[in-house]
Image (cartoon, helix red, strand yellow):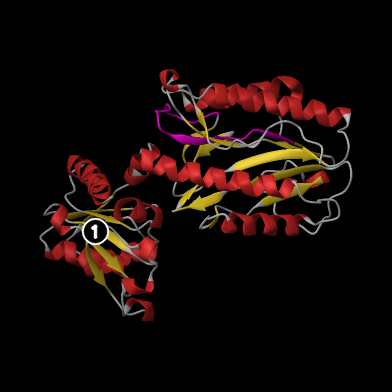
Amino acid sequence: MSEVYTARRERLRERCTASGSATALVSRPANVRYLAGAAPPGAVLLLGMLGKEADLLLCTGPLSAHPEEERPDEALRIQSLPGVGDGRGDPAVAAADLAAAQGAESLAVEEHHLTVARHRAIGSVTPRLRLTDLGGAVEQLRVIKDEEEISCLRIGAEIADQALSELLESILVGRTERHLALELERRLVDHGADGPAFATAVGTGPNSGRRGHRATDRRVEEGDFLSVCLGAAYRGYRCEIGRTFVIGTSPADWQIELYDLVFAAQRAGREALRPGAAYRDVDRAARQVLDSAGYGHGLPPLTGHGVGLENDEDPRLAPAAMGKLDACVPVTVEPGVHLPGRGGVRIDDTLVVRPEADGGPELLTITTKELLAL
């Protein structure tokens, strides 16, 4: 994998050079991990002006404290700053000082991640070093995934599918949302996940279908909608799946109608995923189905987003989103409707954009989307 990380850093270096900065300081943990192979707590990455031999990972302590699978790219130079943990320094400030010592005149930093205090500290230690904004350069590189990254997402999706399918085979009535969420997270780890990709959402009855719902002590009752949204993190990569079920022998007519509507919206969004499709057009495909049925008011601000080292990445599938999809971009498609006081439906899949010649979008989360009565 060393050549993969080296190539990623070279692509970033080319962008920095084109924008007039020979050095860059990467501090956002997901970006450090993407470029270095690991992101120990507090670590920053300095792309040196003398080429890849000058690239340096500065850590807050010895690497021996970190698991083997989280070790950084062996091609990197590594410097530990053991005093940082006691407040006697900052790896970002130390990296800027080293850049200035190398003769750099400017340093591109991730202003969207650095605090104001940290930015000022860098400026005060290296007053002659011109600080520029790296912006979202690394995030842009991360949008298109290589097949190794997609493989990690695929395994994470398999783990999430397995955890969910096992839960559906158990007795659910009388159990709390919180209990079910904790059991799902335990099953994720049991099947090989690093842990949950985010806090597992379990909603029952009037809580079902709510985006970002935090599990409560409400108990599952007969006739409830039960909505579940979970994700597995595997080797740092995070997938997402959401499904809605009915508790009892058969769903009510209004539950069938609402479910069929959200299912149609989700299918429209999935079918719109293709290289060259505008982000806003994918959102519109799903949103229009719900809007035309009278559920336009109160819909979430987006119907999907990218996934990877973070659960909520670019691109955003939203009405005002700018840009077009590329092949090998993993995204979620997750429309939903929540009726206050009654509950609702949310269906969420993780897919990888593929051209039609390769079979179209690749569905990673394969748990059935049939409305099951549990």
Q: Position of residue 11 (x, y in %)?
A: 23, 42
Residue 295 covered by magenta stretch: no
Q: Residue at x 37, y 81 (%)?
A: 86
Q: Position of residue 234 (x, y in %)?
A: 48, 52
Seen from the viewer's position, the closer of residues 24 and 309 is 309
Q: Position of residue 158 (x, y in %)?
A: 55, 43
Note whether residue 239 is visible.
Answer: no
Residue 321 covered by magenta stretch: yes
Q: Which residue is mark 1?
A: 46
Q: Amino acid at mark 1?
A: Leu
The quadrant holding residue 178 is bottom right
Q: Which quadrant of the figure contains the C terminus?
A: top right
Instruction: Work out whether 237 lies above or below 354.
Output: below
Seen from the viewer's position, the closer of residues 150 and 171 is 171
Q: Is the magenta region chiefly helix, strand or loop? A: loop
Instruction: Work out whether 225 lies above or below 42.
Output: above
Q: Position of residue 344 (x, y in %)?
A: 77, 37
Note whether residue 53 is visible.
Answer: yes
Residue range highlighted in magenta: 319-337
**Secondary structure beneath label 1:** strand
Q: Is residue 288 left or right of residue 107?
A: right
Disc 1 crowd rating (10 Å Cα; few below 14, some 14-19, many 20+) is many
